Amino acid sequence: MQGLWDTAHIQPRNDIIVPGDTIPAVFWNAVAARGDQVWMRQKEFGIWRSWSWRQTAEAVREIAGGLMALGFAPGECASILANTVVEWVLADLAVLSCGGVANGIYPTDAASQVHYLCEDSRSTVLFVEDDEQLDKALEVRARLPLLRKLIVFDMDGLRDLDDPGVISLEALRALGREHLQAHPQELEQRIAACRPEQLAILVYTSGTTGKPKGAMHCHRGLVHTVRGYNTLVAQDERDERMCFLPLCHIAERLGGEYFAMYTGAILNFVENPETVPENVREIAPTVFTAVPRVWEKFYSGVMIALKEASGLQQAAYAWSIGVGGAIAERVLAGRPVGAVLRFKFRLARWLALDNVRKLIGIHRSRFLVTGAAPISPDLVKWYLALGVPMLEVWGMTETCGAATGVPAGRIKPGSIGPAAGYNEVRIDPATGEILVRGANVFMGYLNLPEKTAETIDADGWLHTGDVGSMDEDGYFRITDRMKDIIITAGGKNITPSELENELKFSPYITDAVVIGDARPYLTVIVMIDQENVEKFAQDHDVPFSNYQSLTRAQEVQDLIQGEIDRVNAKFARVEQIKKFFLLETQLSAEDEELTPTMKLKRKLVQTKYSERIDAMYA
């Protein structure tokens, strides 16, 4: 990583061109161009296994052959129920190469959700990762008459399974080899017959406001977006990415799998979601995309580690981050950085900042990308002070991922940047809603023509539901979701996301939901960061026996009150939070209160805890 003041090395590349107007065409052309170069790596039994483009192509070809042998027809849907693993990518590309539709299901989804998503998508094939995911599928299989075959990636614990409806990925590949020998031209014919306007993938929304809706994306939109990303973010064959977000989410599917396929960047798969902090230090990605929750977690880890450091180490960090902050302020203001400050920054990196970057695993990162949820501007500035630019992008499932992006040459914390060059973005003058139009906008919601008509107007503008503004430089800023703006009993309009982002900047708070619509004052529901709060309790001899007793401890209540007081100091009196309560249940993605992307569902939380909310206003 060069100095913070030099962004030439993180400017987008326009010279990478892989031909093809469908995802399979782009993939197979990339294989022909890159051959024995490494594309993916995955850790198995403590050893990293590399997949070259040629090896990937062989596996994709065999899986596609197996699908065709099973009677999988063009236009049929196959769903994938698995964590983020290499096999997910292989299955996805095989389905698309057959002319099929690929749909992802969150591995944290319950059996009932698996049933709904397979039924709604009319899936005829379901790929599952292991015995745990297979159990969910078997539980609902009888109610899915269209589902012909279950394909298992990892057969550990299933060696004795005798079920004609279940086949291992290994056996499917063997079946594929036989089929391709008998029908040598069929796959190539399927790939050639695939049209840009065809439905390619389904990406189900996370369901914060009801049942998930299947967003339909065609090949033309996916290829248009991937090519567009190349004008937004700098990435090529020399780069290494970390693949760890759910591949059924638009962020990792487009920004990870398909963008790496187009640019040739190496995809490194983490061992499992729990090992991300260790794996990132091992992989040391040069380009790192994550959601705000990950960036907040890294920051929290550093802050906790600092509390255990010696006085000298704390002083060295304080001076070093101060120097980094001074440079960041100049860069953000567009002012030059003098020679003396540059020298101080080199010293600051040597003293502390390089160690902080290594502790996180971003010491090789040329830049960081954040998206999928709002992030605190202070957090963006902190990473800038470390010497690693953080670029915020904004988009949604329906826009095929990023629709705006902050350019490396001019970062504005709190802004989502100008419109990406491959689409139009504007503010509705009547409502303040952000609208998007372009080839990246989705085809509509599966089986929901009325919802589609509500979302895309006659002129092709997608109504995003986000309220925002645009400054004189064309940079957009999100103020809130249209449905989330709070109007207090006193008539004051409040943007809850601003307060919530400030609260989540605390190492002790994972998520927060601000309440106050038609109420006399603001209150908040807080989900604590279990690891950091437990450590606080242990360090301060606070007795607790379980998660609930931890949240009820007076010292923990005082700790969170202190964090709320810190945030309140930044806001006007009418915007300050008067009361709070802590969620006493340790939540995971399986719980109804959380989306699969680990965000609290605002409406559900407010309904479920209505009595406790009312008590704060008694």
Image (spheres, rainbow, N blue to C red):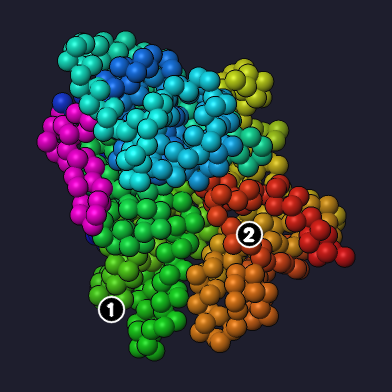
553 above or below 242? Answer: below
Name the residue at 60% across, 79% down: 544
- Nearer mark to the viewer, of 1 and 2: 2
Q: From the image, which quarter does the N terminus lie in? A: bottom left
Q: Position of residue 375 (x, y in %)?
A: 52, 55
Q: How many marks?
A: 2
Q: Which mark is residue 137?
A: none
Looking at the rendering, the stretch of residues picked out in magenta corresponds to: 33-62
Identify residue type, mark 1: Leu
10 Å neighbourhood of mark 1: few (<14), some, or many (≥20)?
Answer: some
- Marks 1 and 2, Cα distance to the nearest angstrom? 35 Å
10 Å neighbourhood of mark 2: few (<14), some, or many (≥20)?
Answer: many
Location of mark 2 (residue): 512
Identify residue type, mark 2: Ala
The quarter holding residue 82 reads top left
Location of mark 1 (residue): 351
Furthest toward the left, the residue is: 36
- Is there any visible trace of residue 513 in the rendered image? yes
Q: Position of residue 334 (x, y in %)?
A: 40, 57
Is the Cβ of the residue at disc 1 closer than 8 Å to that at disc 2?
no
